[in-house]
Every structure is written in structure tokens, then in C-alpha cells.
Image: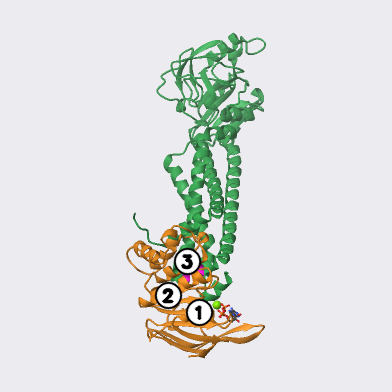
Chain colours: A green, B orange
Amino acid sequence: MTERAFTPGVLARANLRRRPFRSAGLAGLVALFTFVLFGGTILNENLSRGLDSLAGRLGADLLIVPYGYEKETQAALLRGEPSTFYLKADLLDKVRGAPGVVQASPQFFLASLNASCCTAQVQIIGYDPESDFLIRPWTRGNLAALEKGQVVVGSRIIPAVGEELTLFGVGFAVAAKMEATGMGFDTSVFMSLDDVYELMVKGGLAEGDLSQINAFISSIALKTSPDFAPRDVGNELMRRHALDYNLDLVLTKNLLSDISVSLKNFSSFIWVLAAFLWLLAMIVMSVVFSVALNERQREFSLLRILGATRGWLGRLILHEASYIGFGGAALGLAGAAVIIFPFSTLIFQSIGLPHLRLSGLTVLAYGLAAFILAGAAGPLASLYSVLSITRFDIYPTLREGE
Amino acid sequence: MLLEVTRLSKKYTRGGRDFPAVDNLSLSLERGGFICLLGRSGSGKSTFLNMLAGLLTPDAGKISFDGLDIFSLDDRARTLWRNDKLGYVPQGASLLSNLSALDNVRLPYHLGSRKGGSLKKARGLMSDLGLAKVEKSYPPALSGGEMRRVALARAMMNEPELIIADEPTSDLDSETAREIAELFTLLNDRGCAFLLATHDLELSRHGRVLKISDGRLLSD
Ligand SMILES: Nc1ncnc2c1ncn2[C@@H]1O[C@H](COP(=O)(O)OP(=O)(O)OP(=O)(O)O)[C@@H](O)[C@H]1O
Ligand SMILES: [Mg+2]
């Protein structure tokens, strides 16, 4: 048997073990704070990185959509809520020649009501593989050209590359899969415009005469020249075509700024909650420690009688508080890891915002920061107790503690 | 002389007026000596003993231990002096309830700057005092007599030159009190000086008896 010397740490552990409820209660409070702080920042960071990467990779500066369909476009792109809307296709050529427009590529949005692949509704997006710059950057592997009857599917669509996907009774071959984008693309199926038109006719998906359906598209994605401000390019296009075509413009920056606002709200909520919990933990611990200091006057005096110096007692109290603080913090981190990581997909899905997973190193760094901040609440709360131990003679304190 | 106390005084305030709890008290104790302070409740025994142990600052007078004026030391030095030279058994329950009996006995050894282990020594002391069976017990599970013996073993741990015990046999039955008294004689024979406060006449059969009343010595 190896023999342990009685350091302040060893005695602190013995003291905490003999008061399990008090110790666990305080540690639980710190754990709760750590959980909220760590879990909250991780969620928050996930979302804001998702947003950043979205902004960086959403190659388009401008989207032209039918008047009044801004919201639908946003919902379709970001949340994957299926929607259908039309714009006359001959606009495309006119836009291509406009000043400041570098690239223009059309899309056709088609909401599917049921598809054999998925339980949820799928957004079918027709696009022009030749002029496309919106979908390609996300496509995994090297897709040379999209043949007729082939589709590119979002990361959360089930069939794998080489398998078949049936939409409205028509079979399609999955030619490529996309990377996770954290937005509506993940639950979308992409095919050539011609295939979408054909699918609409075959599936009887629209009322009336469909022979002219290929004269319509849903939106045009534009890339503007760096010499022009996207807003100016948009204003010029509106001036020229808004009346004839009943247009609306979506500045992709603005599209994202809506989410930025809700994200900011979310993160300020997390910060306020975390700050509140930290303060609460500090106050409760300070009160409990100073009450305990009174209750334990006899115990501390006995230690002094046996030869413990003030410094030794101070270290004892600091150790107890640190075990509670850092123990609680570790507990909170473990809780966050157990609850947040396995369910993160579910959580993000219900929030319905683009998100990206953080690297392990980043998570570790945030964990460490939360651990230190939360753990330090223990020793900080005990500081008053440490400073106020027996400035007086030991004997009167011993008697008061009786 | 191991201990020289000269004209020691301590006043307390009661009902707005000062009164002397210890009044100009002088006393000396040789190495290996044995003194029993006998006095009624409220006569000032505890106040006196606590000043001797450096736990209470006197209003006047001097305590010199082995030639050292203990109140000339700062708090830290006095604490370490007490840890090293003095075994003090306070009045009433004095064990740390979060530690086992064995750990209570070991603790003082580790409060100074001693190297090495305390286990063997603590076990030896405990079996000397008939405490081998309760080593692992926590104080709430000990009888009154066992608690006193553990406190005594703890006071012995650092091989002090003097043990001061405040009412070591109060609330004990006469049989147990006699056992404790025999222990004192045994330890005193090994060379440790004793200063006891008691109103137990049985205990006062040992050593030199000093009677204290209203903070003054009646006979010496
Ligand atoms: N902190 C204090 N403030 C005021 N009076 C005190 C204080 N401590 C002790 N006294 C009083 O001083 C007197 C001496 O007290 P002390 O405890 O030294 O007596 P004692 O001889 O040890 O008594 P007992 O045998 O009951 O333990 C008593 O009258 C007591 O009421
Ligand atoms: Mg007393």
C-alpha cells in the first residue's frame, strides 16, 4: 500500500466525499453552465460557419426571380422547402448582354409531392449544365457532362451514385452526389432543364397546355463583374426589364443577412443565458461557501490547533472549490458531448438553417475555454472565504463554531 | 524549565464591563513534569490553557517555552511551533469528522514539513492506546472514550515535549476516565510533560495539583 501524505488536495477530496449532496449540487450548477456555454457556442459556431461557407460558395451575386417570390426562393435554397414558380425564358439572353453581367445561368424549380426516394418532399431543380456555376462547385467527383436521364442529388438524398431514382414514375440514374451544403441543396435533385420539362409533361404536373413549358424558367443566377456593384447591376436590369417581365431581384448577400440576424439573436440569447448562469453559479457558490465557512469554523480551528497555517487552510478551501468548479465543468462538457453531438443533425434540422460541422480541434479549443471559464467560477467564488479565514485568535473561533 | 508563565492576564467583557478570566497567573513546569489544574467551571482553565497553546493572545504577561517567547513569533511560526512541540487536546469533541480515526491521528504529521510516511507510526500509537479496532471508523461512530483516546494519539503523533489537555475525562464514566488517566501516567513515564485541566478528582491524583479560582492560583 502506497501512503498518501495529507496535502490540502487530499483533505479537500475527503471533505467533499463526506458531503456528497452539497458537492454534487454545486458541481451540477457549474455543469449546467458549462453545458449551455459549450453547447451553445458550438451550435452557434456551426451555424455561422455554415453561413460563411454558404456565402463564399454560393457563386451567384444576384438571383432574378418572378415578382413576389423572394421568400420562396430563400426557402427553397436554404431550407429545401419545395416550391414552383415561373419566369419567361427569353429574358436569359437579354440578361446575358447587360452591363456588368459576367455569367448567367437559368434554374427551374419544381416541387415534388412524392418521390419514391424520400419520405419528405423533394425539390427538383432543373439547370443548364453548360452555363451552370451554382451547382457544380458542390458536386463531388468529376462529372464531365450531365446526360439525358441523369441526375445530381443532394447529400441527403438516399440513392448512391450509379443507383436509380424514380420521380413521378420516371426513372433517373444518379450520376453524382453533392457535398453537404447545409442548405436546401441537400434535399434537392438536379437535372437538365429538358429533363424537367419532359418530366412535367409525362407526369402531368401542371395544368393546361404544356407544349410551351420550355419557354419558362424559375430563376436566373448571375455572376457580376468585380468592377460593378451587384446592386447597381440589379438596378439596371430592373430598370430595363422589370415591367415586361415582372421581376424581382434577390441580392444573395441580403438573402443571407436575414439568417445572420436570426443567428445573431440566437447567439446573443446563448450569451445572455450563459452569463446569467455564470453569475447564478457564482452567487450560489459564494453564498454556500461563506455559509459553510461559518458552519465549519470549529473544523478549521481544529486544523489550526493541529498546526495548519493560514496558507494551508486557504489552499484547502481553494482545492475544494476548484474540485467543484472543474469537476462540474468536466461533467458539463461530457453532458454536452453526450447530448449535443449525437443529436446535432436533428437539432440543426429543426432549426432549419445552413450549418457545417466544426473540426475536432476547434471543438476542443471551445471545450477548453468553457472548461476554464466554468471551472474558475469555483475558486473565484471561494476567494472571499479564503481571504477571511481566521484573522482572529483561534480559540474564540473554535468556541463560536461549537 | 520547559514552560515558564509569568503574570499572565486575560480580560473578557461581560455586560459592558471587563472582568479578568485569568488574573496575573504565574506557573512553571519542568521537562517531563505533570501538572493538574483543578478548578470549578468558569474559573478560567480553558482561557489559560489556550493562551499557553498560542491560540489566544494574552492581555499581559509572558509565556516562554524552552526559552522561546511564543507570542514574539508571527502567526505562521507559532502555528508550526505548536505543530512540532505541543500536543493540544481541546475541550469537547475535537476530531475531524471527515477523516477516519487513523487519518485523524496521521494528519498533524503532514502539517509541518516532515518527510516520509506517517502510517506505521500512527498505527503503532493507536494499538498502544487500544484503538487498533477502530482505525477505519469515522468519529461519529466512536464512543466518547474512543474519541478521547484518538485525540490523545493524535496529540502524541509528532512526539511533543508537552501535552496540554483540557478536561480530557469529562462526560466519561469513571472506569473509562481511569483508563485515560493510566494512559497519561504511561506517556508521562516515557518523558512527555503534561498539563491538564480538570474538575475530576480521580485524575488529580496524578502529578502536582494547582487549584485555580477566578483566574488566580490558590496554592502552589
Ligand atoms: N469569549 C468570551 N467572552 C466573554 N466571556 C468569556 C469568554 N470566554 C470565556 N468567558 C468567561 O470567562 C470565564 C472563564 O471561562 P473558561 O472557559 O476559561 O472557564 P473554564 O474554567 O474552562 O470552565 P469549564 O470548566 O466550564 O470549561 C467564564 O466565566 C466564561 O463565562
Ligand atoms: Mg474549560
Q: Which mark is residue B197?
A: 1
Judged by its main secondary structure, the magenta piece is: helix
Please indicate, yes or no, whether residue B76 appears anywhere in the rendered image: no
Q: Nearer the viewer, mark 2 or mark 1?
A: 2
For ligand 2, tell me if the residue under mark 1 lies within 8 Å.
Answer: yes
Q: Position of residue A358 (x, y in %)?
A: 46, 39
- Amino acid on which the number 3 mark rests in the picture: Gly
Q: Are marks 1 and 3 in contact (CB under 8 Å)?
A: no
Up-down: is B49 above or below A325? Answer: below
Q: Residue furthest left?
A: B116
Q: Nearer the viewer, mark 2 or mark 3?
A: 2
Dot 1: what SS?
strand
Please indicate, yes or no, whether residue A360 appears anywhere in the rendered image: yes
Residue at numbered disc 3? A314
Closer to us: A221 or A387: A387
Left or right: A73 as drawn, with respect to B34:
right
Closer to us: B83 or A182: B83
The quadrant where residue A259 appears: top right
Q: Are marks 2 and 3 in contact (CB under 8 Å)?
A: no
**In magenta segment, residue A121:** no
- Amino acid on which the number 1 mark rests in the picture: Ala
Residue at numbered disc 2? B184
Which chain is indicated by disc 2?
B
The quadrant where residue A285 appears: bottom right
- Amino acid on which the number 2 mark rests in the picture: Phe
Q: Which residues are magenta?
A: A300-304
For ligand 2, tell me if the residue under mark 2 lies within 8 Å.
Answer: no
Up-down: is B138 above or below A239? Answer: below
Up-down: is A397 above or below B24? Answer: above
Q: Nearer the viewer, mark 1 or mark 3?
A: 1
